[in-house]
Image: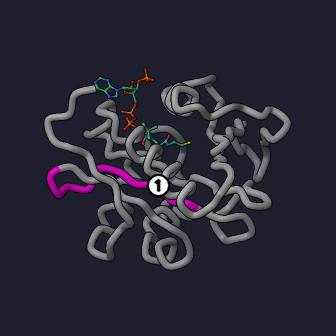
Amino acid sequence: MQHTVRITVETARPEDFSRIGEIGVAAYAGVQLLSDEYAAVLRDVARRAAETVVLVARAGGEVLGSLTLAAAGGPYADLARDEELEVRMLAVDPTAQRRGVAEVLLRAAAEWAQEHGYPALVLSVVTTDGPRTPHRLYERLGYRRDPARDYVGYWEGHPQMWFYELAL
Ligand SMILES: CC(C)(COP(=O)(O)OP(=O)(O)OC[C@H]1O[C@@H](n2cnc3c(N)ncnc32)[C@H](O)[C@@H]1OP(=O)(O)O)[C@@H](O)C(=O)NCCC(=O)NCCS
């Protein structure tokens, strides 16, 4: 894969927070109906950086995307259990998509999890319209579905979610 500018990943810094929030809202607005409540959660990067780990991808100093890593039992984990670490809020700036940014972020997440002794990364993805870009991305990187942990129905109209796991 060719990149004109190298993509690097590191823990987000306070000066990145507002940009990460805006990217989250812009990216998710493209795939699902975004409630004001969820938009506010996506924008509150300061809180999740304090309570979890937020990784940020940059190229040439510019923030292009991010993801959040949430341990089981914490406020940001939807489905992680035991020692699993959950990937949440993966988002890439719509103008920087299809350049491999998400792949670099997910590889860095796996490295971070391994270094910190987690045995698996888990995540879930909206599947209302059938498999799309994120599903292909996860499967290419070695994530496996576990249909027994798929879920639907946190609230009225909640989309069908597929569960994926990457053993580390
Ligand atoms: C899903 C998402 C994070 C992917 O981000 P991304 O940075 O575009 O992902 P990548 O570039 O790594 O891969 C996306 C596609 O671009 C392709 N691609 C990557 N680098 C490329 C390059 N240099 N040239 C051409 N294509 C390339 C990949 O092969 C992949 O193709 P595929 O869809 O056929 O499998 C992004 O679309 C997004 O933010 N979506 C909205 C939020 C969301 O759905 N998040 C996931 C929730 S679970």
Q: Is residue 161 visible?
A: no
Choose between 32 and 1: the one closer to the eye. Answer: 1
- Give, as a three-letter code, the residue at label 1: Leu
Q: In percent of the image, x 42 and y 60: which residue is there? A: 55
Magenta stretch: dominant SS?
strand
Classify 88 as above or below 12.
above
Q: Position of residue 157 (x, y in %)?
A: 72, 43
View quadrant of ligand 1: top left
Q: Tell me if residue 164 is in the magenta stretch.
A: no
Q: Position of residue 124 (x, y in %)?
A: 66, 43
Q: In percent of the image, x 48 and y 49: which residue is there? A: 90
Q: Tell me if residue 67 is in the magenta stretch.
A: yes
Q: Quadrant of residue 9?
A: bottom left
Q: Quadrant of residue 83?
A: bottom right
Q: SS at mark 1?
A: strand
Q: In percent of the image, x 47 and y 73: which residue is there? A: 49
Q: Position of residue 120 (x, y in %)?
A: 67, 49
Its colouring scheme is one colour
Q: Is residue 113 visible?
A: yes
Mark 1: few/some/many CA within 10 Å (<14, 14-19, 20+): many
* Extent of the magenta region: 60-69
Choose between 40 and 73: the one closer to the eye. Answer: 73
The residue identified by callout 1 is: 67
